Image (tube, rainbow, N blue to C red):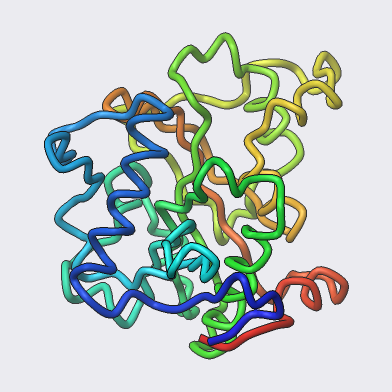
Amino acid sequence: MQADDPQFHVRLAETAADLRAAQRLRYEVFVAELGGDGPTIDHANRLERDELDEAYDHLLLIDESLGGKIVGVYRLMRDDQVHKVGRYYSNGEYDLGPILSSGRSLMELGRSCVAHSYRGGTAIYHLWKGLARYVEKHQIEVLFGVASFHGTDISKIAQPLSLLHHRHLAPEPLRVRALATQYQTMDLVPEHEIDRVAAMRDVPALIKAYLRLGGCVGDGAFIDHDFNTTDVCLVMDTAKLSERHRAIYSKGETV
């Protein structure tokens, strides 16, 4: 599917080579750049992968000016696909009971990344437009997935975590909760003591983007020592998108 900018197009991975290219980009971002590690990472071949990859759809952002190089990735799992592996990635970090019992159409988002040199430009916009068309095509009602703060030192991110807790906590019907094994409360700083401008500045760009689209967060963070991250679970009810945001999110190409 062609994007408005002929430099980029977005499509689903179709071959084993596509998947390996996506895993290689994930390695460059999550491992080489951010210091992630874990038992499933293939350092010899520079691949960030796990046993769930084969069951997921992988949305790819392609730079045609570089001969079709993959420069952005999103990993997607609809609720009608989860039977292939029996669980979502997020099940390993969060009790998803509230959304799984909601009776609504679900999709998990994860492993989202864009190559370093493409950040701050229009690349992510094209990737998100492709994602929006996928959501529309499959009539997804609730999006969810973990997103990360870099590092596991909670003292350094107490303010932004507290801001998320006080201002962006998911409503009860969608409020997933971090598993007890690595549960980290986000209610760390009283709301009146938060420097909201500074705290929001320290929220990662991907999480801020979801918040602008009406996203919210589950109860508690999950400390992932293997990946050197502190994870929050984002939940977005697509029916809650404002008309302005819906227009931005959904215009563009089809998947």
Is 107 on the left-hand or right-hand side of 32? Answer: right
Is 237 on the left-hand or right-hand side of 41? Answer: right
- Establish if 199 lies above or below 67: above
Q: Quadrant of residue 215?
A: bottom right
Is 138 on the left-hand or right-hand side of 157? Answer: left
- Establish if 201 lies above or below 16: above
Q: Which residue is drawn at the image coordinates 33% and 42% (left, top)? A: 93
Q: Residue furthest top?
A: 155
Q: Which residue is drawn at the image coordinates 73% and 33% (left, top)? A: 166
- Establish if 21 lies above or below 202: below
Q: Quadrant of residue 58?
A: bottom left
- Establish if 179 lies above or below 118: above
The spot of residue 50 in percent (x, y) is: 19, 51
Q: Nearer the viewer, residue 217 or 59?
A: 59
Q: How many marks?
A: 0
The spot of residue 234 in percent (x, y) is: 55, 51
Q: Nearer the viewer, residue 216 or 68?
A: 68
Q: Nearer the viewer, residue 143 or 113?
A: 113
The spot of residue 126 in percent (x, y) is: 64, 68
Is 189 on the left-hand or right-hand side of 194? Answer: left
Q: Which residue is drawn at the image coordinates 49% and 36% (left, top)? A: 148
Q: Quadrant of residue 54?
A: bottom left
The spot of residue 46 in percent (x, y) is: 22, 40
Q: Which residue is drawn at the image coordinates 41% and 32% (left, top)? A: 222
